[in-house]
Image (cartoon, rainbow, N blue to C red):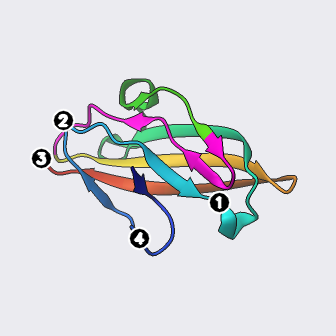
Amino acid sequence: MSYVTSSERESPIEQGRNEEILYKLITTPWGGKPSNVLVAAYDATESFRDVGSAVLKGSSEIDGDVITLPALKSLSMGHNYYVEIRFTSGGDVKETHVEVRCVR
C-alpha cells in the first residue's frame, strides 16, 4: 500500500506497467470522516482521456479517515495518469488528485 498524501509520497508517483497498487488517501487534512467516494482516472498523455474502466480495479474502501482507492493497474509505459478522488467530508464535497507516471 502506498499513501498519496502527507510527506510520505508526492506526485508524480512512479509505477510499473505490470504493477497493481492500492493507494491510500489520508483525508484528515480535509476534515476526515469521508463518505460518498468517487474515483476517476484519466490518461494525461492522451488529452485526459477517461481510462477509469481500464486501469481501476475494484472499489474504494473507507476506514476512519483513510480512503483506499481501487487498484491502479494495466498502465501504458511512458504515459502519465491523473487519478481524481472526490469525497464528502463535514457536509462539503472535497476533491484532490494524484499523478502517476508509468515508468517500466
Q: Earlier in the sequence, mark 1 or mark 2?
A: 2
**Part of the protein shown in magenta:** 62-77
Q: What's the distance in space between the residues labelled 4 and 2, CA to CA?
A: 23 Å
Q: Earlier in the sequence, mark 4 or mark 2?
A: 4
User: What is the secondary structure assignment of the residue under circle 4?
Assistant: loop
Which residue extends farthest right?
91
Q: What's the distance in space between the residues labelled 4 and 1, CA to CA?
A: 14 Å
Q: Type of residue at label 3?
A: Arg
Q: Position of residue 44 (x, y in %)?
A: 36, 47
Left or right, 6 with respect to 18, comes to: right
**Which label belongs to residue 104?**
3
Q: Nearer the viewer, residue 20 or 41?
A: 20
Residue at the image position 31 percent from the left and 34 percent from the top: 73
Q: Which residue is mark 1?
A: 27
User: What is the secondary structure assignment of the residue under circle 1?
Assistant: loop
Left or right, 97 with respect to 8, comes to: right
Q: Which residue is mark 2?
A: 18
In front: label 1 or label 3: 1
Please rate how many residues cluster around mark 1, counting C-alpha atoms within 10 Å: few if below 14, some from 14 to 19, many from 20.
many
Asked if residue 73 lies in the magenta stretch, the reply is yes
Residue 17 quadrant = top left
Q: Type of residue at label 4?
A: Glu
Q: Which residue is mark 4?
A: 8
In front: label 4 or label 2: 4
Q: Nearer the viewer, residue 30 or 53?
A: 30
Q: Earlier in the sequence, mark 3 or mark 2?
A: 2
Q: Type of residue at label 2?
A: Asn
Residue at the image position 23 percent from the left and 39 percent from the top: 19
Q: Earlier in the sequence, mark 1 or mark 3?
A: 1
Q: What's the distance in space between the residues labelled 4 and 3, CA to CA?
A: 22 Å
